[in-house]
Amino acid sequence: MSLIADFGRAVAQLRDQRFLGVLLKALAITVIGLALVFWAVMAGLGWILPESVALPWIGPVRFLDDLASLAAVGLMLVLSVVLMVPTAAAVVGFFLEEVAEAVEAEHYPGLAPVAGPGLSAQIGDALRFFALVVAVNLAALVVYLLLPPLAPFVFWLVNGFLLGREYFQLVAMRRLGPEGAARLRRANAGRIWLAGTAMAVPLSVPVLNLLVPILGVAVFTHQLHRMAPAS
């Protein structure tokens, strides 16, 4: 029940100007990033593929690059669903401190302030998480293709584990340090995976999946203070 209550408190705080600011910045950066990837793929195909190919007994065929471009568009639409998850998660990772501070200011005003991790650490954590989620989801893509009926469940469980592990670790590190956060995470592994899986369900819904990392940081901030009230 505490998990449901924390989700409710996180959703209720979406009206907070600090949450909205992070959402708008994450949305802008994510859309621009995916657009650049799409442009790079299309430009690369245009540079590699010839305008026409001469086939025996047929002559020059000029629509090969058009067909490849259409195939690339379809591929990017499929990959954008997979790539949106790590992209949105990594982008919001840059603004994790803002979300956690907003939650603590609203619900835990008596806590002592903590020093932020610094820009270089935030960039490193965000890039590491991005690479991890991309690698795992690309590996899971094989399961999605081979066993389509199981794809949603594999997607939820895999990303639930990643979201729970990474976001709880990042949130807890702010007050407990890396070792303390890791110990608390291991002691509550099942609970954290459950919370992460609940967040992973709406990840496959476009636009809504941009809210998931923000809600994840908020929920795990609440969960941290339930597991370690003195933190």
Image (cartoon, helix red, strand yellow):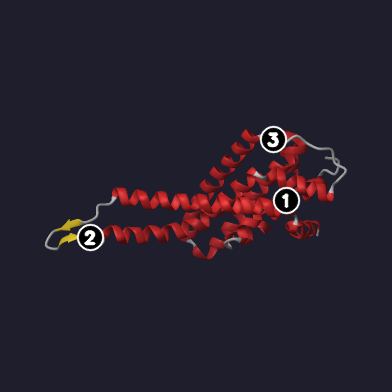
Residue shown at 76% from the left, 41% from the top: 184
Task: Tell me: 177 left or right of 42.
Answer: right
| CA–CA distance in space, label 2 to label 3 | 55 Å
What separation in Å lies between label 3 and label 1 (alpha carbons)?
A: 19 Å
Q: Which amino acid does label 3 sit on?
A: Pro
- Secondary structure beneath disc 2? loop
Residue 142 or 181: which is nearer the viewer? Answer: 181
In the figure, is residue 220 to the left or right of 109? Answer: left
Q: Name the residue at 69% across, 41% down.
A: 170
Give the amino acid type for the residue marked by disc 2 in the picture: Arg
Proximity of marks 3 and 1: CB atoms separated by less than 8 Å: no
- Residue ranking furthest to the bottom: 149
199 left or right of 205? right
Residue 150, placed above or below residue 165: below
Q: Disc 3 marks which residue?
A: 117
Closer to the N terminus: mark 2 or mark 3? 2
Instruction: Residue 122 in the image: state x and y as whole percent.
Output: 64, 38
Q: Can residue 193 be seen in this view?
A: no
Q: Are marks 1 and 2 in contact (CB under 8 Å)?
A: no
Task: Give residue 62's mark.
Answer: 2
Q: Are marks 2 and 3 in contact (CB under 8 Å)?
A: no
Local SS, label 3: loop
Residue with the mark numbered 1 = 18
Spot occupied by residue 119 in the image (x, y as percentages of width and height): 64, 35
Q: What residue type is labelled 1?
A: Arg
Where does the image place residue 146, in percent across and percent down from the top left?
Answer: 46, 60
